[in-house]
Amino acid sequence: MEYETITLRVEAGKVGIVTLNRPKQLNALNDQLMNELGDALKQLDHDDSIGCIVLTGSEKAFAAGADIGAMAKYSFADVYKGDYITRNWEQIRSIRKPVIAAVSGFALGGGCELAMMCDFIIAADNAKFGQPEIKLGVIPGAGGTQRLPRAVGKAKAMDMALTGRMMDVTEAERAGLVSRVVPLDKLMDEALGAALSICDFSQIAVMAAKESVNRAFESGLSDGVMFERRLFHGLFATADQKEGMDAFMNKRKAGFTNS
Ligand code: HXC
């Protein structure tokens, strides 16, 4: 597939970097972009040489939300029956390799929701997060009312969804929405560094860790702990567990083979 609204490149032979690329519209997310993004992510997920994915936008905007121009004319029948706008949004959840959001500038509406669908968010000091859909006469439609309270708690999630105000990066970090904040000119270095360190680990253990943390949002504590324990036990069947522990015991760097 030829991409027009995103770009895809591979760094160091192992990190897939996907950049949202509709700069004139502040990376507003239309169906074409979401189709291309889904295609790129699936392609990277299926490529054995890729260990981690970074999703980013421009300095001014990660994404300013779903494309309002495209949405404005739709009727209920269009969006319900045709599933326009929301069609491909949950695709990112099926990606089994880690996806890091490197966010600078606006992450609003669907842009904030897209960042929250990633495994964690590294933010530049100019990042701003918000769910301003209420100002347009609608509500978040890609998980914002569900993922935001899980990330920042009810008080701030309600505040954001009901007033449509933006959160700056200091507040976002304090509230637990982002994992790290860095100066704007260091954003991609930081995200790439995190991605490369993940690539050094056993891909099997990395996928298991992602699956297990995600389970925390889907199950009660005892089921989640049991799920984790079974995955933990299963990893003792891998060569990478033997290698990782032997390397520690012999004070050498582990060389994982993803087997
Ligand atoms: C379409 C958009 C857009 C959007 C910005 N643009 N956001 N186009 N959809 N979401 C366009 C503007 O129309 C403008 O085009 C150009 O990008 C630059 O934007 P400006 O407004 O001139 O920039 P600025 O003054 O810096 O303000 C930036 C902004 C503002 C604060 C981000 O653009 C804004 O409030 N955007 C809308 C944010 C929003 O409401 N997002 C939620 C969308 S609903 P022209 O042609 O005039 O230069 C949503 C639902 C998700 O996301 C559902 C998911 C399934």
Image (tube, rainbow, N blue to C red):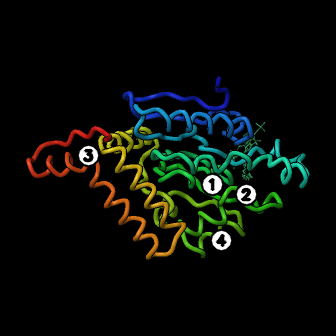
Disc 1 under 8 Å from ligand 1? The reply is: yes
Amino acid type at image mark 1: Glu
- Find numbered disc 4 in the image and state the secondary structure of the residue it sits on: helix
Q: Disc number at residue 244?
A: none
Q: Residues within 10 Å of mark 1 (few under 14, many from 20)?
A: many
When the figure is inspected, residue 29 is found, relative to residue 208, above or below; the finding is: above
Give the foreground label among 3 and 1.
3
Q: Nearer the viewer, residue 52 or 57?
A: 52
| Marking on residue 113 | 1
Residue visible at 49% across and 63% down in the picture: 215
* Nearest to N terminus: mark 3 or mark 2: 2
Label 4 vs label 2, nearer the camera? 2
What distance separates the C-alpha of mark 4 from that of mark 2?
A: 17 Å
Residue shown at 70% from the left, 33% from the top: 24
Q: Tell which of 33 and 155 is nearer to you.
A: 33
Where is residue 188? Give x, y as percent: 44, 38
- Amino acid identity at mark 3: Asp
Q: Could you tell me which residue is drawn at 57 percent across and 39 percent down? A: 57
Relative side of 256 to 78, left or right: left
Give the labeled residue for mark 3.
Answer: 240
Which of disc 2 and disc 1 is earlier in sequence?
1
Which residue is under mark 4?
159
Determine whether label 1 and label 2 are within 8 Å by CB: yes
- The residue carrying mark 2 is 141
